[in-house]
Image (cartoon, rainbow, N blue to C red):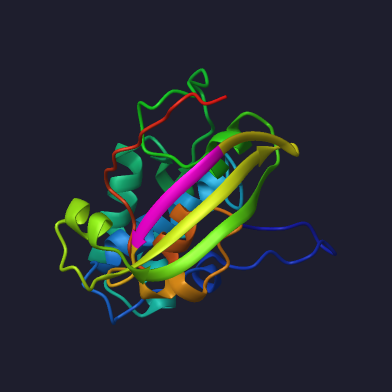
Amino acid sequence: MASEPGAPQQPSLASLLRLRTDTAQPMYQQLEAQIRQMIGDGVLAAGATLPAERVLADALGISRTTVKRCYGALRDQALLSAHGRLGFMVEGRTKPLNPGMDRLKGFTEEMRELGKVPSSDILERVAAPDRAIASVFGAPSNTPFLKLVRVRRGDGVPLSREIAWYDLSAAPALAGADLSGSLYAVLAREGVALTHCEQTIEAAF
């Protein structure tokens, strides 16, 4: 990503990526999740050029095959496109915005897609075992869980009250993480990127 003379130097993609070796998640999936998050957050804007597979692999000290699988997965999701000698470029959002539940995305991403500033108020945050929740997860009764109750806001306007439980044995870093923003982003950084979920939405007065 070249810049004009005198313009502030943009950080390289490799410097923004954090790969972990203490997780069972394959490195190409870690790369995919982090780059996808950067595209969603606007860190990688439409039209941005990504390093060639070999260049990024050398910078991260990983195999070219790992980067190739990552880029391939992002192309399948229509987030990247190949442009010959130009390499891979970030695609813009060309489809009409559909804020429905047809794909996995969090509140933060949806608000940004709608042009709103997301924020959260944490009402309750408790880490402790819970037998009832453990049974829902099919986990042992002594499994540690994080209960998080938040009011989600768009441009400062309260839009929902969210009650969520998280298995701390799968993502222990959540216990001390900043949870005022996107939980999906925190999980992705910890190598626990989500692939599917079940969400329940209820109207309340």
Q: Is residue 106 above or below residue 38?
A: above
Q: Quadrant of residue 31?
A: bottom left
Q: Which residues are magenta?
A: 161-166
Q: How many marks?
A: 0
Q: Is residue 124 above or below residue 92?
A: below
Please state, as top left, top right, bottom left or bottom right, where the C terminus lies in the image: top right
**Which residue: 79% across, 65% down?**
8
Can residue 129 be found in the magenta stretch? no
Horizontal side of 104 relative to 175 (left or right) equals left
Q: Is residue 195 above or below residue 3?
A: above
Q: Is residue 139 visible?
A: yes
Report x, y in % for residue 98. Answer: 48, 21
Q: Is residue 86 above or below residue 21?
A: above
Determine the residue located farthest toward the right in the rendered image: 6
Horizontal side of 42 relative to 89 (left or right) equals right
User: Closest to the observer: 108 or 12?
Assistant: 108
Q: Quadrant of residue 101?
A: top left
Please state, as top left, top right, bottom left or bottom right, where the N terminus lies in the image: bottom right
**Which residue: 20% across, 51% down?**
136
**Which residue: 59% across, 32% down?**
113
Can residue 162 be found in the magenta stretch? yes
Report x, y in % for residue 21. Answer: 29, 81
**Which residue: 24% across, 55% down?**
132
Report x, y in % for residue 158. Answer: 67, 35
Report x, y in % for residue 169. Answer: 28, 72
Q: Is residue 50 visible?
A: no
Question: Which secondary structure is most common in the magenta stretch?
Answer: strand
User: Closest to the observer: 159 or 105?
Assistant: 159
Horizontal side of 169 relative to 90 (left or right) equals left
